[in-house]
Amino acid sequence: MTSPSRSCCPSCPETVQPASGPVQEIRTTDSRITLADRLDHFLARFGVNRMGHRVEPGLYRLGNPTEDSPVFVSANYTLSFDALRSALSGRDGYILVLDTLGINVWCAAGKGTFGTDEIVRRIALTGLESVVRHRTLIVPQLGAPGVSAHEVLRRSRFEVEYGPVRASDLPEYLALGRATPDMRRVRFPAVDRLVLAPMELVHAALPTVAGAIVLYLLAGLPAALGAVAAVLAGTVLFPALLPFIPTRDFSTKGLILGGIVALPFSAAFFVETAASGWAGVLAAFAPLLLMPPVTAYLALNFTGSTPFTSRTGVKREIFRYVPFMAGMAVLGAALAAVLGTAHLLGAV
């Protein structure tokens, strides 16, 4: 077995010569989460330079590992990598970082970048079999959808051992030598749901501001506030209230939430235009037709971030409800156009 050669200093990558193939590097990392790391996490959460939060794929040395130290597999998304290395504070091991294009483990497993081929390729590129004596990889459970354990074993001779869902459970997992049922359970608490809101809110900010300004000029402050309320409902209220909104589909959950949020605006428009008879009724219906589809559309963005959905379920939901949502929005816009025209003509 070939032992890794020593680097000149801790900050320089170490090199090994695998049994075959090109010379590879073993980089050094530690478990400290610095201020720069936290800034990176903050920017990632807000979607700033979304695809730029990456670490170099390859093999990393954590602490002072030996040939018998465990090998953990992670994605090259900084939040995934940092969660793993910080959970292993005080421990020695290797981290095999796959090239997932800066995408987290779970999403990358669904997209195929955290998968069998990349694991096998990365083992070969890093010369891992010449670095450790054992033949076991500890893969995060959320990466399982993309990994065929028997194929990895057949093609690389490394056995895949699925670790816990959360990196924070790794110390206990290593102590027990197995994952308990509690470690296998996927949770989605409020803090995990709300941490998704900033990115969605940032993405929707500019169109919301532009739409609110246009609506303010055309129909006044209540209309502008209605646009803002519909977007906040879809980006912030929806993840916060997700488990408590009845129905299973995200579309119908969003329609229900958007309808509830629209009620005060509907009442306000009705009172404002009640003296005009038919116009008051139309004005009351306009928010109920326009705001729910906006909230529901934004709610659909969370389908890829939760354990509540499946890929086939999301496709089915989109085909079933998006045409209905579009119809509501078109009808609501037509009502708003009729009211606006009537207002300009002095009819209401």
Image (spheres, rainbow, N blue to C red):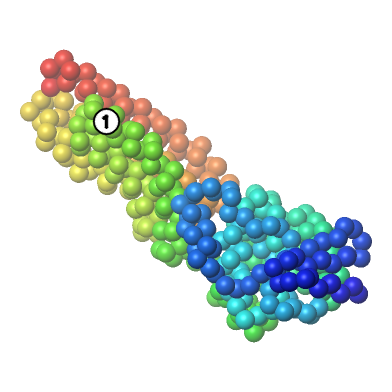
Q: Is residue 199 above or below residue 82?
A: above
State the residue at coordinates (54%, 63%). Answer: 37
State the residue at coordinates (31%, 27%). Answer: 333
Q: Is residue 197 left or right of residue 70?
A: left
How many numbered circles does the render carry?
1
Q: Is residue 119 left or right of residue 90?
A: right
Q: Is residue 34 left or right of residue 345?
A: right
Q: Is residue 265 left or right of residue 109?
A: left
- The quarter of the picture where the N terminus appears is bottom right
Q: Give SS at disc 1.
A: helix
200 and 279: which one is in front? 200
Circle 1: residue type: Leu
State the residue at coordinates (30%, 23%). Answer: 334
> Residue 132, percent across and down?
82, 74
User: Where is residue 274, by image quadrant?
Assistant: top left
User: Where is residue 212, by image quadrant?
Assistant: top left
141 and 312: which one is in front? 141
Q: Is residue 90 above or below residue 342?
A: below
Observer able to see residue 125: yes
Q: Answer few, some or many: residues within 10 Å of disc 1's Cα (few below 14, many 20 plus, some between 14 and 19).
A: some
Quickly name the residue at label 1. Answer: 215
> Residue 339, percent across and down?
21, 23
State the residue at coordinates (66%, 69%). Answer: 29
> Residue 107, percent across and down?
60, 53
Observer able to see residue 161: no
Farthest bottom residue? Answer: 175
Farthest top residue? Answer: 345
> Residue 36, percent across and down?
52, 62
28 and 120: which one is in front? 28
Q: Is residue 281 above or below residue 102?
A: above
